[in-house]
Amino acid sequence: MSGSPFAGALAKVRTHGLKYSAVSVVNVIVGQGLLILFHSAAGIPATASNILAVCISAVPAYYLNRAWVWGKRGKSHFTKEILPFWSFAFLGLIMSTVAVNWATSHFDSKLIPNIANLMAFGLLWTLKFFVLDTVLFGAHHHHPDYEHDIDVPEPVGYPPVADDAAAG
């Protein structure tokens, strides 16, 4: 039964699940911290705060997932990595913004936007893992022809990671 879809999914979780979870924890801390900063501390309306927090926190989430979880190096592939990842980020932004709008119209608390944001992104979390693994950064994307699309530079201050062959 090792060829079953369940066994394949379990193997993917064992291979990348802990790192993916750790990146998610970092992203939740960054996103929730920004949401508290913008909404509770700066007094920016909840919807605008949510949009800012999601857009800002998605950048480190992309690079951490790409480099650390799936071990990708070099140029990002626009149509096979960047576009699908940001499509998920945009879907999360829409879902969380709708949730934040609804929650803040029904409840009066400074933390309601955070709870609504967490619930919306929680719905996407598992699905996103399997899409990232099978469509975006999985092992089948580690071949020479895959890297030829556009040159998307790493962000400023992003530490380069030595290739395994060069390091050994």
Image (cartoon, rainbow, N blue to C red):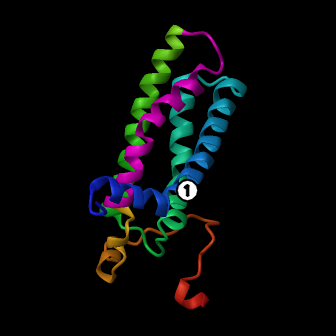
Q: Residue at x 45, y 42 (%)?
A: 125
* Residue carrying label 1: 18
Q: Residue at x 62, y 36 (%)?
A: 32
Judged left or right of residue 9, residue 57 is right
Residue 83 visible here: no
Residue 108 x %, y %: 61, 10
* Secondary structure mainly formed by the magenta segment: helix
Location of the C terminus (image quadrant): bottom right
Magenta residue span = 107-135
Foreground pick, 41 / 88: 88
Q: Is residue 7 magenta?
A: no
Judged left or right of residue 37, residue 4 is left
Location of the N terminus (image quadrant): bottom left
Residue 94 visible here: yes
Mark 1 Cα shell of 10 Å, populated few (<14), some (14-19), many (≥20): few
Q: Is residue 67 above or below residue 94?
A: below
Name the amino acid type tagged 1: Leu
Judged left or right of residue 34, residue 129 is left
Q: Residue at x 64, y 14 (%)?
A: 109
Residue 79 x %, y %: 30, 61
Residue 91 x %, y %: 37, 38
Q: Residue at x 48, y 35 (%)?
A: 122
